[in-house]
Amino acid sequence: MDTTGKLTAATGVVVEGNLYDVVFVDGTCAEVFTGCDATSDFLFRSLSSAYNASNALLQTVLVDTLGGPQYDNDPSLTYGCTSTTLCRIVTPYASNGFIYSLAYLANYPNSWNFDNVFLADFLLSNRSYSLEPAWVYAVWSPHTAQVPEPSPLALLGLAGIALGWSQRRRRLRANALAQ
């Protein structure tokens, strides 16, 4: 979450049994994904994986929390989404240099519209698409677990134990040699 309360990223999102981190980025596909002209520009490289990733966002990230942010009821709380009535978050998965394919989720705040994941293909060009400014791109990466560092007190305690043990061994060795 940024300083204005907008959701900018999520960590540990489960997609097909694996953990991923995702950052929401505003821009065009070419700006966000190194040209958006090769399938290797994207983490998910199949229709089913991109669909499942978008669905995981809908089911586990863009949800309302009791007493907390209402990401489902107010799509504008997601970074890059300015509308309170609809937010489209795009996960591209393939490109051949001329056309790129994507899965996008539509997050609606009201009960007569439903949240869903859609699939689409678009031509690449140097100009912006009329829909593209209303899109936010999901930039996915494998989840990186935080490894906690040991506290200085614990390290000092371990050093003290090791020092005491070595002193004890030294005394036992000295006593054995003296006899």
Image: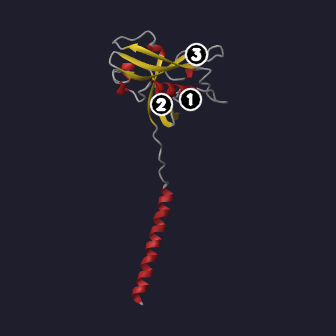
Residue under the image location 47 percent in, 47 percent down: 147
Sequence-first disc among 2 and 1: 2
Q: Amino acid at mark 2?
A: Val
The percent coordinates of residue 132 (x first, y second) are: 44, 14
Q: Amino acid at mark 1?
A: Val
* C-beta proximity under 8 Å, tags 2 and 1: yes
Location of residue 107 by image quarter:
top right
Near-viewer residue (94 or 10): 94
User: For the residue labelled by badge 1, is the local secondary structure a helix, a strand or a loop?
Assistant: helix
Task: Between label 2 and label 3, give the one nearer the viewer.
Answer: 2
Near-viewer residue (132 or 69): 132
Residue under the image location 41 percent in, 81 percent down: 173
Residue under the image location 51 percent in, 25 percent down: 54
Q: Which mark is residue 61?
A: 1
Location of residue 113 by image quarter:
top right
Task: Between label 1 and label 3, give the one nearer the viewer.
Answer: 1
